[in-house]
Image: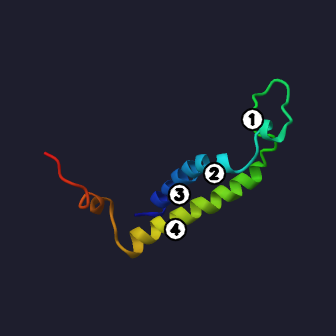
Amino acid sequence: MGITTYLAIYFIMWWITLFLVLPFTGKSQAESGDVTLGTVKSAPSDPKFGRIIIINSIVASAMFAIFYITVEVFGVSFEDIFTFLPKFG
């Protein structure tokens, strides 16, 4: 695979892990006890987007490193996945 493919895979992993990281990174307004008028109680009280992006990038980089080692070092390809699945039909 080329560098463009790996960049695309990292980009996809980064967006997927963003939705995994978001629920664990802060308190809601209901939990902090300070609900701003006009917002829902489940809105974050102090989002800290910089911290979320850094944590997300670390998690996505770790996942991408595992993927890269699996593909490049161990030589597992997309076609190899189907050898482990049962055959239907």
Do the CB atoms of the residues marked 1 and 4 lie less than 8 Å apart?
Answer: no
Report the side of 83 relative to 25 (left or right). left
Q: Nearer the viewer, residue 6 or 71?
A: 71
Query: Who comes first in sequence, dot 1 or dot 4?
Result: 1
Q: Which mark is residue 21?
A: 2
Q: CA distance from mark 2 to mark 3?
A: 16 Å
Query: Label 3: few (<14), some or many (≥20) within 10 Å?
Result: many
Answer with mark 3 or mark 4, whichever residue precedes in sequence.
3
Q: Earlier in the sequence, mark 1 or mark 2?
A: 2
Quarter of the image with the N terminus in it: bottom left
Picture coordinates of residue 70, whole percent (x, y): 41, 69
Give residue 56's position: percent from left, percent from top.
64, 56
Q: How is the image coloured?
A: rainbow
The numbered mark at residue 43 is: 1
Q: Residue at x 80, y 37 (%)?
A: 29
Q: Amino acid at mark 2?
A: Val
The 10 Å Cα crowd at callout 1, few under 14, some 14 to 19, many 20 or more, is: some
* Picture coordinates of residue 81, whole percent (x, y): 30, 60
Camera-nearest residue between 8 and 81: 81
In the image, 31 versus 19, the foreground residue is: 31
Residue denoted by label 3 = 10
Mark 2 Cα-neighbour bin, 10 Å: few <14, some 14–19, many ≥20 = some
Give the residue type at disc 1. Answer: Ala
Q: Give the amino acid at mark 3.
A: Tyr
| Contact flag, marks 1 and 3 (Cβ < 8 Å) | no
Q: Residue furthest bottom?
A: 73
**77 or 27, which lies in front?**
27
Q: Which mark is residue 65?
A: 4
